[in-house]
Image (cartoon, coloured by chain):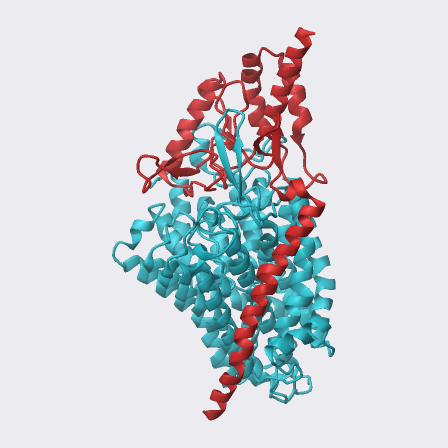
Chain colours: A cyan, B red
Amino acid sequence: MTTNILYFVIMLACMTALAIPMGHYLAKVFTDERHALPERLTYRLLGVDPDRGMRWSQYGMALVLANAAMGLLGYLLLRVQAWMPLNPSHLSGMSPDLAFNTAMSFVTNTNWQAYSGENTLSNFSQMAALTFLMTVSAATGLAAGAAFVRGLGHAEKPEIGNFWVDFTRIVWRILLPVCFVLALVCIWQGVPQTLASDAVATTLEGAKQHIILGAVASLETIKHIGTNGGGFYGANAAHPYEDPTPLINTLHILSMLLIPAALTVAFGRMLARNRQGWVLFGAFFVMFVGFLAIVYPAEQAGNPQLTALGVDQHLSATQPGGNMEGKEMRFGIAGSSLFVTATTAATTGSVNAMHDSLTPLGGLVPLGEMMLNCVYGGKGVGLINLLQYAILAVFLIGMMIGRTPEFLGKKIEAREIKLVMLAVLAHPICILGFTALAVLWPHVTDSLGNTGPHGFSEILYAYTSATANNGSAFGGLSVNTPFYNTTIGLAMLIGRYGTLLPMLAVAGLLASKKTLPETAGTFPTATPLFMALTVLVALVVGGLTFLPALALGPLVEHIAMLHGQLF
Amino acid sequence: MNDTNTSIRSLLRPAITSAVLFMLLTGLAYPLITTAAANLLLPWHAQGSLVQRDGKVIGSALLGQDFTAPRYFHPRPSATQAPDPKDPSKTVDSPYNAELSAASNYGPTNRKLIDAVAGRARAYRSENGLAANAPVPVDAVTASASGLDPEISLANAELQLPRVAAQRGLPQADVERLLNEHAATRVFGLFGVPRVNVLDLNLALDALAREGQHGTKS
């Protein structure tokens, strides 16, 4: 127990220590005046002027069009898989609804997977369609984050940067070099990286074992650095080839938290408001620790139904104990719990343990984090989501004390608040609306892998994960049906652009406003008090909306489990 | 309105070019260069850490495989399935199928989970000669997340040890020594769980048996 808690403390310390240099580097990339050679060549090929600033509407338009072209290209590559190289097993192309779902899923950084990689995708598709979409969707989110922060810093200057410059730099200067180095570390620990697609072994007992191989390491690193989450294999990071050792598990967890955490530091530097950056970091941190403190004890306590059968679930020097159904030995309870908390906080959505088999309260944690969607959050958008709650907090405080609310020297007025509320409401309306539709739709419940309250949790989890662009699943739900592929695909689009575009508009509006000098009457926002208020607003506004749905799923199931009721 | 149209038109070329360019860069160049570097620096690892015995591939050091013979240590239960040879639209249980990693995805209040664990606990106790109410380590009766978990807990290995030793006619102390040699500890005393790789341990047992045969012959 002490070792596990020490492990958590050291991991959180490492994350903080890494966030500082990475944050400084991000700020440099986002504000550098010079263009490096590969970048200048890229601009020439694209035919864009890198020194031309864009207003929020132009920036948003460029972002959406680029994503549309990339999503379409990915869709086509998945459809024509049968005629592409590196496909020795002659896998056919994806069906239209599955290819739509997959392309939308990867271009929105969700990485929801309604298929198993092993028997659906060739090595070529894993690289050219998926690794490609994973990298560009991460770059898109991070670019939006950079533009948003820039907008907050500008005074009476409506341009918030150039999308092509942000996007190109993020790929060349951040994602590719970091991923290449990390991929080599992964390979050293056993993650395969080969163009061979399989190997056949004869086991010690004489059975044939057909082992699927491929370019796993290059996909695996961008999957975590880019908070994408889509696995090469069906079992995702639980597969020994994706996450072979406790050391790699640690690197995966740090990789996914690295850029979301560093962005708060970059925010502080770019706006010359370092304290404000740390207040945002603190808000992320407090919520993260809170969720970890729920999932770890719940999983370590195990399942009382198994104790009744004489199963020993105690932590000891020779076994991890706890709820080991759907978990891997090398991670145990601590390495799995921390991964659960990180993957749904940073909206990665890769899994090293099966979320469907978590205890009810353990399963509440990923659901809750995705519902709030601002505990670190995905590339760039996590910071945007947190700032949306910060602006709301400023507004509520302003109402209470009867002053015009100000944030970072900018007046927050009716138009900004309307846009913020649009972004805040798009999330629950999408999740709860589609969940309600799925529960009522005829025969959709045939897809359930579990019945009773857990079955409801499976559906709720699917739409929460899609809308939060997370991509993890309660995997018992069979989602490769036209109904789920289509509605989940739509939820991913609404979740991505329904919050991103209004918030870019807020940045654009704030960028064109005057910066007001701070006076004695200004409410200070770079304080622990404001951090607490932001967390409170996120929990009350974001969390209470979902409480009734959570009560029907995990909370009822927890009570049922304690009373020995089975379904 | 005209303004928006021109701005969309001027964005079409960069949008389409960027899709193709970045597909080539991040979807092909990046994975292919990584593959080349990996196969130059770490070829065995890059090819899946395949283990050979007598020149034949017998598995991967990282993937579990199924063991049912009493003379071997047994791995954790696996929920992987395979298409039914009689009817490809259905699936049948196929433990440690490396073609299709999978978990049970049973929730904690699912009757199927509780029934499966009860059955596995009964079988585990009878295989290893334990009392009918003896506690069973949780990893021995729960299915792993990948269905390919290569490792078991030391508690689980200790309970199987007398059976393996008896089947092989070895003193328990010899098997205990092998187990201790092959047990993995926490990295830096922090990461991971004390555990043992089943394939690794079983290979060592077989090697010990071969040495023994050579010993008596000479």
Outermost residue to the bottom: B2
Residue closest to the eye, A301 or A33:
A33
Instruction: Work out whether A330 lies above or below A87.
Output: above
Residue A313 placed where, x, y %? Answer: 52, 33
Examine the rendering and report whether any part of residue B185 can be seen.
Answer: yes
Instruction: Work out whether A286 lies above or below B209.
Output: below
Residue A379 placed where, x, y %? Answer: 58, 65
Which quarter shows the N terminus of chain A?
A: top right
Instruction: Work out whether A277 lies above or below B133.
Output: below
Residue A87 placed where, x, y %? Answer: 49, 50
Residue A356 placed where, x, y %? Answer: 44, 47
Examine the rendering and report whether any part of residue A278 can be seen.
Answer: no
Residue closest to the eye, B62 or A290:
B62
The quadrant holding residue A291 is bottom right
The quadrant holding residue A132 is bottom right
- Identify the residue at horizontal 50%, vertical 34% (top origin): A209
The quadrant holding residue A515 is bottom right
